[in-house]
Amino acid sequence: MQNNTDITSASTDKWDIVIKPKSSLFEFNFKEIWAYKDLMLLFVKRDFTAQYKQTILGPVWHFIQPLFTTIVFLVVFNKIAKIPTEGEPAVFYMCGITIWNYFATCLNATSNTFVTNASIFGKVYFPRLVIPISVVLSNIVKFSIQFLLLLGLMAYYGFTKGHFYFGWTWLLVPILVLMMALLGLGAGIILSSLTTKYRDFVVLISFGVQLLMYATPVIYPLSFFENSKYLPFIQWNPLTPIIEAFRYAVIGEGTFSMQGLIYSATFTTVLLFVGIIMFHKVEKSFMDTV
C-alpha cells in the first residue's frame, strides 16, 4: 500500500523543467534559449579567453591582424594594382576589413558547431542554438576592439589632414552590425548542419569565405564597377549593401541604398529561418554521424 502511495505522489509532482522532443521543425522555443542566458555568457567568456590563453600578445592580435591586412591591401591593391578608393585609402580598407572580419569569423566558427562541441552535446542538455549565438556575441568583443583601431586611424588622419567624419549616420552602425551578425549566424548554422555528414564542407568553407571577399566590395568601392557587366553580380551579394552602408555610416563614403538594405534584410531573414529549421532537424540525430 505504501508503494502505491509513493507512485501516485511521484506521478503528480510538478517539474520546473520538462525535456521533451520537438514535435515540429517549426517549433521555435526562444524563451528557452533566453532561460540559458547565463550559460551563453559563460560560452562567450570561454570563446574569448581560450583562443589566446597560451599566447604572448593575447587580444593584441586583434589589432595586429587588421593593421597588417590594411598595409598589404595598401601595397598590393592601391599602389601596385592602382584600384581607386573613396576617401583615404588606409581608412577605406580598414573600414571594410573591420566589418568583413566580423562576418567571416562568425561564419567560420558557427559552421563547426556540431563537430567542435560534440563532447558537450553528448553529456548535458541545453538548447543547442546557445552555442552559435554565443559565438556571434563573443565576436562582438573582437569587432569592438578592431572598431577602436579604426577610430584611432581615423583620428590620426583627422589630425594630420584635418578631416574626421562624424555625423548622424553613426547611429546606423549597431543596425548594420546586427544585420551582419544574423547573416553570419544564418549561414553558419546551415553549414554546421551540413558538416555533420559531409566533412568536405569544412575545407570548402575556409576556401569559400576567402573567395567571397573578392566578390564583396571590401578592397574596392562599388562605384569601381559602375559601368561593368559584373556590377549586377556584386549587387546580388547580400553582403554588398551592408558593407557599403557601413562605410557610408562610419567614414561618410560608399553607397547607401535603402533598397539594397531591404534586400539584405529579407535575404538574412529567410536564411536564418531555413538555418534554424535545418539546425533543429540535425540536432536530433547528429551524434550518430559526428
Image (cartoon, grey):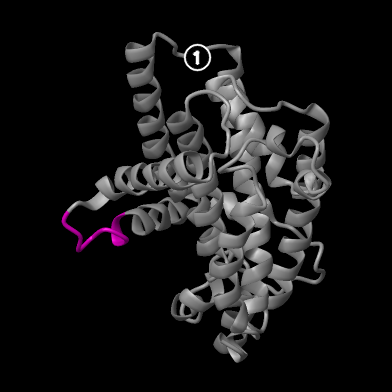
What amino acid is found at the position of numbered circle 1 in the picture?
A: Tyr
Residue picked out by circle 1? 165
Q: Is residue 69 left or right of residue 136?
A: left
Q: Residues within 10 Å of mark 1 (few under 14, many from 20)?
A: some
Q: Which residues are magenta?
A: 49-56
Residue in view at x 59 percent, y 12 percent: 168
Q: Is residue 154 left or right of residue 9?
A: left
Q: Where's residue 116, x and y in %?
A: 47, 75
Residue 164 lies in quadrant: top left
Above or below residue 51? Residue 121 is below
Q: Quadrant of the C terminus?
A: bottom right
Above or below residue 81? Residue 255 is above
Q: Quadrant of the N terminus?
A: bottom right
Above or below residue 232? Residue 172 is above
Residue in view at x 41 percent, y 53 percent: 44
Q: Please state which of residues 194 and 276 is positioned toward the viewer in this rendering.
A: 194
Residue 27 lies in quadrant: bottom right
Q: Where's residue 190, x and y in %?
A: 69, 66
Asked if residue 21 shows in the view, the reply is yes
Above or below residue 111? Residue 67 is above
